Image (cartoon, grey):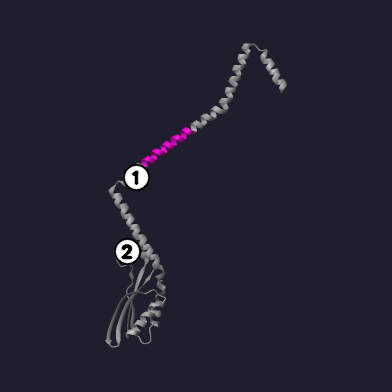
Amino acid sequence: MRERIDLATTWINNRSPRDRLYLFIMGFLIIYMFYYLLMHRVVTREKVLLMEQLTKIQTDKAATQQQINTLTQAIQNPELVKALEEKKQLMTQITVLDTRLDKLKPRLIKKEFLDNFTDDVLLARPATIDLIQFNPLPPDKWPKNEVDRSALTSVTEELNLYQFELTFQGGYFSTIEYLRRLEKLRWPIYWDSLNYHTFRYPKANVVVRFHLLSQ
């Protein structure tokens, strides 16, 4: 390798100044061509890609700014502000009702168990109570108020209200005992009204109304 370098150096030194100039120019052109092929084209390609990315970013920025301007104009609309406020209030009401429903679910019964409920009410009667009648009233929806019902969720709208009227005769303490037994049943009873009328002391005529909730 050393000998080749020495031979090349000797060969160049034996050339005339003009030949040396030509050799220098040719060497420069060869180096430039390598630079252009290996470096310049790569840099140019990178520059083009960066310009394309910059153009895309500017386009996205303009579109985003347009959306911001549209939203700003919409938010300043009084009707939209009022609608958003009403929606917020409605969502608050729905949240409250859903919470109440979650607490209520363990106290719901299935419709097919109503016959079993009737049997349990009759069997809970103390011996000192004379049963007159036990009648189911027409079923209804819960809640009865249409305004309140309009704000309920679809799950709550499925609640049915089954009302009953129980009429019997007995003394004061017998009545208390019967009501206490009813409250201890496995069925969640909601009391509506109680009419206690003494007709021959200590016997009284008692009319009790209560209801169950079913989904």
Q: Residues within 10 Å of mark 2 (few under 14, many from 20)?
A: some
The quarter of the displayed image where residue 183 is located: bottom left
Location of residue 19 (image quadrant): top right
Residue shown at the point (39%, 41%) measured from the top left: 64
Give the percent coordinates (x, y) of residue 200.
27, 88
Mark 1, residue position? 71
Q: Residue at x 68, y 15 (%)?
A: 11
Tell me if 198 is positioned left or right of 124 in this view. Answer: left
- Residue 147: x and y in percent read 29, 63
Prevalent SS, magenta region: helix
Residue identified by numbered label 2: 149
Q: Which residues are magenta?
A: 50-67
Secondary-structure class at tag 2:
helix
For the C terminus, the quadrant is: bottom left
Q: Secondary structure at mark 1?
A: helix
Tag in front: 2 or 1? 1
Disc 1 crowd rating (10 Å Cα; few below 14, some 14-19, many 20+) is few
Amino acid type of the residue that numbered disc 1 sits on in the rendered structure: Leu
Whether residue 31 can be seen here: yes
- How many numbered marks, from 0 up? 2
